Amino acid sequence: MKRTLSILVLIITLTSCNSEKKENQIQGTWRLISAETTEKDSTFSTFNPKTKMIKIINDTHFAFFNHDLNNGKDSTAAVFFGGGGKYTLKDSIYTENLEYFNNRQWENGKFEFTVKIKNDTLIQKGIEKVEKLGIDRIITEKYVREK
């Protein structure tokens, strides 16, 4: 009886040690390395090598920032935009609820993506649809984890 009780206690102890919450691999800071858009029957790159875009994802929120690499010194090419909000992740379905954006017509948009993470690369693909702006397209973005 003592041996059975000891084994039972050991199993419970080992099981409780392994029941830690699984790490959310999408959390982190990501740098955009490629982007393409499909509208109607046309697919084209939307990645701009003259800018740097990062996406930061924590346990409840995401934020993204994009700026030109000339630090805004060339006023014809100066770029800055950013946005963020809450997100949900269920299996491979990542849904952004865009609460803040410098182009206010995008705010309160809900954007659903399928995400895949392989090593230090995040790929997200989904539909960007903003009816009031006439936007309805598929986007695919590839990010690498910043260290």
Image (cartoon, helix red, strand yellow):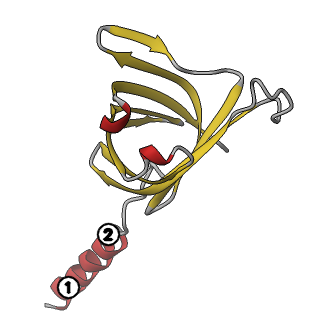
Q: Is residue 28 visible?
A: no
Discs 1/2, front: 2
Furthest-top residue in this view: 41
Furthest-left residue in this view: 1
The image quadrant of residue 112 is top left
Q: Which mark is residue 55?
A: none
Amino acid type shown at disc 2: Ser
Residue tagged 1:
3
Q: Secondary structure at mark 2?
A: loop
Question: Where does the image place residue 93, in percent across and percent down from the top left?
Answer: 28, 44
Question: Where does the image place residue 126, in percent across and percent down from the top left?
Answer: 32, 32
Residue 55 or 80: which is nearer the viewer? 80
Q: Please state the total of marks drawn on the protein image.
A: 2
The image quadrant of residue 129 is top left
Q: Secondary structure at mark 1?
A: helix
Residue 28 or 83: which is nearer the viewer? 83
Q: Residue at x 25, y 84 (%)?
A: 9
Residue 62 or 15: which is nearer the viewer? 62
Q: Separation of disc 1 and disc 2 at Cα?
A: 24 Å
The image quadrant of residue 73 is top right
Furthest-right residue in this view: 73
Question: Where does the image place residue 144, in percent across and percent down from the top left?
Answer: 57, 34
Q: Is residue 51 left or right of residue 62?
A: right
Question: Where does the image place residue 118, in percent across and percent down from the top left?
Answer: 44, 34
Q: Which mark is residue 19?
A: 2
Amino acid type shown at disc 1: Arg
Q: Residue at x 46, y 11 (%)?
A: 44
Q: Residue at x 30, y 36 (%)?
A: 131
Q: Residue at x 54, y 36 (%)?
A: 120
